[in-house]
Amino acid sequence: MKYHKLGHTDIDVSVICLGTMTWGEQNTAAQAFEQMDYAVSQGVNFFDTAELYAIPPRAETYGRTEEIIGEWLKARGGRDQVVLTSKIAGPGEDWIPYIREGRTRFNRQHIVAALDASLQRLQTDYLDLYQLHWPERQTNFFGKLGFEPSDDDFTPVHETLQALNEQVQAGKIRYVGLSNETPWGVMQFLSLAEQHQLPRVVSVQNPYSLLNRSYEVGLAEVSWREQAGLLAYSPLGFGVLSGKYLAGARPEGARLSLFADYTRYSNEAAIAATEKYVALARQHQLDPAQMALAYVNTRPFLTSTIIGATTMEQLKSNVDSINVTLSSELVEGIEAIHNDHPNPSP
């Protein structure tokens, strides 16, 4: 395994981070235990979860993923050997009314309530990293490319940082991070933290893959210069880049087979690009999924690549991507495809 520093901290995190959102929905607790046991045996020390999980979000499974991780930590021990991160959900009245009535505010009241509940489910006294899952304000995230100005009312960033700082001082969290953020948002958090001696953002968890490299446009420089590295989620585009959905295939038990509305990476342009990436990988005798992950793993602005798997076979292959080396010829091929099919799934 390879490791990077988490932002400006002295924490070493594995370049492969274990994603957990299928646990409690597509995966049982027993399967999740097997995944965690294997990941740790391979040097993975970084686990990412959220109060929202399992995915797709449902009231019946809200918080179940955290509960499973808590059960594993209690059974296995070694909490100090795992860098554990979770997230507070943002507002979402239309689709998560069961989480604080869908009206989360990133203020002291809601941050304390969400964090304390996560710690209880995870059976731990602290989190190494606590993230805001998506912005409270109205902006372009979750695949929305353009920004549309609005008169939305959101908690001032300074107030949010003060609330998070209270939890740092209380020993409940060590560091803070953002997710599904924009360059403006990240720089606001960084600037106000510096001005007021408040917790400095150490990471940004956004989508990044061969099908969506929009992070490179503005956020990559922020990550590099400000030591707030990318935690890349959906590095396989919901599994699309493995090639398993090409020609209309829908394997039994696969995410897109079970949840037909997960179409973010399945438009015509994304399919056309995926066909070329899969062909390129096979031309170089590589597994398409491992090639896609290896590309993400080697980005200079990256801290960690969040992988998710529903089977042990997938997990082992994804973890092993850390050992895949991409030749200069292959990288040139990737860039040529990207030039022809830039960000088909923003």
Image (tube, grey):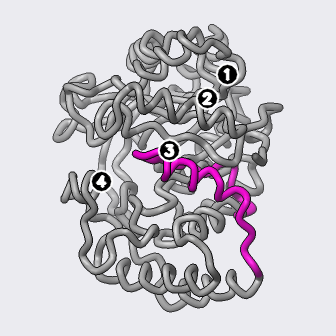
Q: Amino acid at mark 2?
A: Leu
Counting residues from the start of the chain, the first of labels 1 and 2 encountered is: 2
Q: Which residue is mark 2?
A: 129
Q: Nearer the viewer, residue 124 or 129?
A: 124
Q: CA distance from mark 4 to mark 1?
A: 33 Å
Question: Is mark 1 in CB contact (under 8 Å) with mark 2?
Answer: yes
Q: Is residue 307 magenta?
A: yes
Q: CA distance from mark 4 to mark 3?
A: 22 Å
At a point 35% along the width and 36% down the height, the residue shown is 27
Q: Amino acid at mark 3?
A: Ser
Magenta region, residue range: 299-327
Which of discs 4 and 2 lies nearer the camera? The answer is 4
Q: Which mark is residue 174?
A: 1
In the image, residue 103 sits, relative to residue 305, either above or below, namely above
Counting residues from the start of the chain, the first of labels 4 and 3 encountered is: 3
Q: Residues within 10 Å of mark 1 (few under 14, many from 20)?
A: some
Q: Which mark is residue 315?
A: none
Q: Nearer the viewer, residue 197 or 334?
A: 334
Q: Residues within 10 Å of mark 2 (few under 14, many from 20)?
A: many
Q: Which residue is mark 3?
A: 179
Counting residues from the start of the chain, the first of labels 3 and 2 encountered is: 2
Q: Which residue is mark 4?
A: 255
Which of discs 4 and 1 lies nearer the camera? The answer is 4
At a point 54% along the width and 83% down the height, the residue shown is 338
Q: Toward which corner of the image does residue 240 lie, by quadrant?
A: bottom left
Q: Amino acid at mark 4?
A: Arg
Q: Toward which corner of the image does residue 245 lie, by quadrant?
A: bottom left
For numbered disc 4, what is the local secondary structure?
A: helix
Q: Is residue 43 magenta?
A: no
